[in-house]
C-alpha cells in the first residue's frame, strides 16, 4: 500500500496485482463531500484496518469497496476489474467473493441460526442440503459457537454470539475478501478479544484479505498488517489529504501528529471546544438560511401586492 497513491495497474505484472485497488476515490451525497482523493492497495492475504472518528467516512469507504456506494469520481478495482464498469449482474456475482460482517450482524430474525448461515449457500450455489448442513456445522465450530445454537433464532443469542454467527455466514462462500464494519462495537472486553482472535483465524485461510473498520485501538493493534486513519473533511483545508496516517500499528503508536495522538490516546483535548464552535457555525448557517428564506418570502409578497 502506498500513501501517495498506487502505481497504475498497467505497470504491474498480473501476478503482483493487488486484490483490491482504490484510486482517487471521491464520494458526495448531494452537496456534502464525504471522501476525497482516497487511494490505496490491498494485497491478497493482507489485513487493513481503517480508523477514524465518527463522520470521517470509514463505513462509506468500506461500502464503496463492495459497490454498495457508487463513487462520485475515482475507481474501485477488484483483481484489476472496475466495479463501476460492471453490470448489476456482474457486480452481484462478484459479491459472492466477498464476505461482509455487519455492525449489528444483520441476521434474519425469522430464520434460525442454521438457516441464516446457510442462506448464501442456498442463494448462490446448488450444493445438496446434506452438504450445506455439514458446511454450516463446520462454520459454527470455526467461530466457536456450540451447535445447539443452530436451531435458535437470533433474538435468543447474546450480542457476541450473533456477531460470531454473522461472521460464520460471511465465510460461507469461502470469500477472497472479508469486510468488517465495527465488529466489536457493543461488546465487553473479553468478547471483543474473542472477535479479534477470530479475525486473526480468518487470516489463516489461504490468501483471504480483510478490511476492518473500527474505533477500537486494541483491535487495530492486534489484527492489522497495516492501518490507515481518515480525518473528517470539514476539519481539513482543501489541499490537505484525508488519509492522515498510513503505516503499521507500531508506526501509529510512534506518530507525533497531534490529530493521531488525540485519537490513539482517546483524549478530548481541544475537541470539545471545536465541537462547540462547529455547532455555533451550523446554527449561524441555519439562521442565515432562514433569514434568506424569510427575505425571499417578503420580496414575493411585495411583488404580489404590487401586481
Image: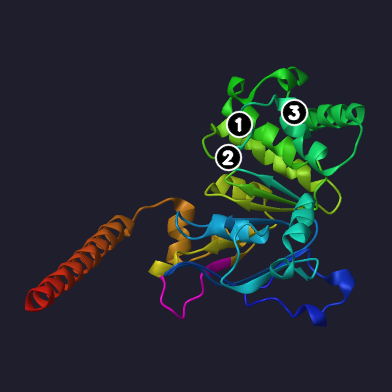
Query: What residue is shown at x 11% (from left), y 71% (from top)?
Result: 301
10 Å neighbourhood of mark 3: few (<14), some, or many (≥20)?
Answer: many
Task: Determine whether the residue tagged by mark 2 lies in a helix, strand or loop.
Answer: loop
Compared across the picture, whether 52 is left or right of 144 comes to left
Task: Determine whether the residue tagged by mark 3 lies in a helix, strand or loop.
Answer: helix
Q: Earlier in the sequence, mark 1 or mark 2?
A: 2
Task: Determine whether the residue tagged by mark 1 lies in a helix, strand or loop.
Answer: helix
Task: Return the residue found at the far front.
Answer: 307
Tell me the tag on residue 184: 2
Tell me the tag on residue 191: 1
Q: Which segment is the magenta one?
A: 236-245
Query: What residue is shown at x 86% (from left), y 42% (from top)?
Result: 125
* Residue 194 appears in the picture as rendered: no
Q: Position of residue 226 (x, y in %)?
A: 67, 60
Tell me the tag on residue 115: 3
Q: Are marks 1 and 2 in contact (CB under 8 Å)?
A: yes
Instruction: Tell me how far mark 3 sits from mark 2, CA to CA.
Output: 24 Å
Instruction: Tell me how far mark 1 sits from mark 3, CA to CA.
Output: 24 Å
45 and 34: which is toward the camera: 34
Amino acid at each position: 500500500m502506498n500513501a501517495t497513491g498506487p502505481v497504475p495497474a498497467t505497470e504491474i505484472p498480473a501476478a503482483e496485482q493487488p486484490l483490491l485497488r482504490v484510486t482517487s476515490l471521491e464520494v458526495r451525497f448531494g452537496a456534502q463531500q464525504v471522501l476525497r482523493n482516497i487511494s490505496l492497495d490491498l494485497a491478497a492475504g493482507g489485513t487493513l484496518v481503517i480508523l477514524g472518528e465518527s463522520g470521517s467516512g470509514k463505513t462509506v469507504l468500506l461500502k464503496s469497496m463492495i459497490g454498495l456506494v457508487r463513487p462520485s469520481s475515482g475507481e474501485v478495482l477488484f483483481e484489476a476489474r472496475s466495479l463501476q464498469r460492471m453490470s448489476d449482474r456482474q457486480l452481484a456475482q462478484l459479491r459472492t467473493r466477498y464476505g461482509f460482517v455487519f455492525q449489528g450482524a444483520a441476521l434474519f430474525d425469522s430464520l434460525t441460526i442454521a438457516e441464516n448461515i446457510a442462506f448464501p449457500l442456498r442463494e448462490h450455489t446448488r450444493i445438496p442440503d446434506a452438504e450445506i448442513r455439514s458446511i454450516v456445522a463446520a462454520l459454527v465450530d470455526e467461530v466457536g459457537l456450540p451447535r445447539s445454537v443452530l436451531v435458535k433464532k437470533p433474538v435468543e443469542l447474546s450480542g457476541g454470539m450473533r456477531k460470531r454467527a454473522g461472521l460464520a455466514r460471511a465465510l460461507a462462500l469461502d470469500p477472497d475478501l472479508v469486510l468488517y464494519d465495527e465488529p466489536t462495537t457493543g461488546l465487553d472486553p473479553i468478547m471483543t478479544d474473542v472477535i479479534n482472535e477470530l479475525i486473526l483465524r480468518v487470516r489463516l485461510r489461504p490468501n483471504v484479505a480483510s478490511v476492518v473498520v473500527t474505533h477500537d485501538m486494541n483491535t487495530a493493534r492486534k489484527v492489522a498488517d497495516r492501518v490507515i486513519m481518515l480525518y473528517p473533511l470539514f476539519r481539513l483545508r482543501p489541499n490537505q489529504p484525508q488519509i492522515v496516517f498510513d503505516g503499521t500499528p507500531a508506526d501509529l503508536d510512534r506518530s507525533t501528529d497531534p490529530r493521531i495522538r488525540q485519537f490513539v490516546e482517546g483524549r478530548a483535548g481541544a475537541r470539545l471546544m471545536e465541537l462547540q464552535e462547529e455547532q455555533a457555525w451550523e446554527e449561524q448557517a441555519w439562521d442565515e438560511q432562514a433569514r434568506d428564506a424569510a427575505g425571499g418570502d417578503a420580496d414575493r409578497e411585495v411583488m404580489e401586492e404590487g401586481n
